[in-house]
Amino acid sequence: MTFIKQQFYELEISHLNANNREDKDIILNLLDENFKEIGKSGKIIKKSDIENNSLHTFEYKISEFVTEKIQKGIVLVTYKLFNETDNVTTNRSTLWIRKNSEWKMRFHQGTII
């Protein structure tokens, strides 16, 4: 795995890690102020929704992980995510943007397959 691919893999793992999801500050620090998610249910989720609600703490496995540089400071990540807790597989995509020397999650989508 290349350095760039490994870096974004670790960012995605940080976002999904059950222990991290119990500490919202860790998750909120990963998110851009204008973060938006289209969840697997189709519901739109914003950063403020995450600030005000609890997060799911499932166990996951990532496969078919791909990174694509869109332009300087913008990277698209796609992968399959298997939720070991409820046996559901989703396609995932995340748009990461670089702000003040940190990568922030700007957009995330999950689609059940």
Image (tube, grey):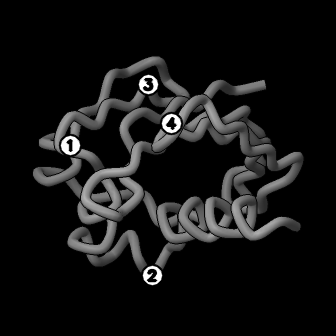
Q: Which residue is mark 4?
A: 95
Residue 88 in view (yes/no): no
SS under mark 1:
helix
Q: Between tags 4 and 3, which lies in front?
A: 4
Q: Position of residue 71 (x, y in %)?
A: 56, 32
Q: Amino acid at mark 4?
A: Leu
The residue lying at 34 percent from left, 60 percent from top is: 30
Label 1 – label 3 distance at C-alpha = 12 Å
Secondary structure at numbered mark 2: helix
Judging depth in this view, the residue of 47 and 33 nearest the camera is: 33
Query: Residue at position x 88%, y 67% from top?
Result: 1
Residue of label 2:
19
**Comes first in the chain, label 4 or label 1:** 1
Q: Does the image show residue 62? A: yes
Quarter holding the C terminus is top right
Disc count in the image?
4
Asked if the residues shown at circle 3 and circle 2 are in contact, with their CB atoms under 8 angstroms apart, the answer is: no
Q: Are marks 4 and 2 in contact (CB under 8 Å)?
A: no
- Which disc, if any, is residue 38? 3
The answer to whether the residues at label 4 and label 1 have Cβ atoms under 8 Å apart is: no
Q: How far is the residue under mark 4 from the one under mark 3?
A: 12 Å
In space, the residues marked 4 and 2 are separated at their CA atoms by: 23 Å
Which residue is tagged 1? 47
Q: Name the N-terminal-most of marks 1 and 2.
A: 2
Q: Quadrant of residue 67?
A: top right
- The three-letter code of the residue at mark 1 reads Lys
Q: Specify which label sits upstream in the sequence, 4 or 3.
A: 3
Front disc: 4 or 1: 4
**What residue is shown at x 62% (from left), y 60% (from top)?**
8
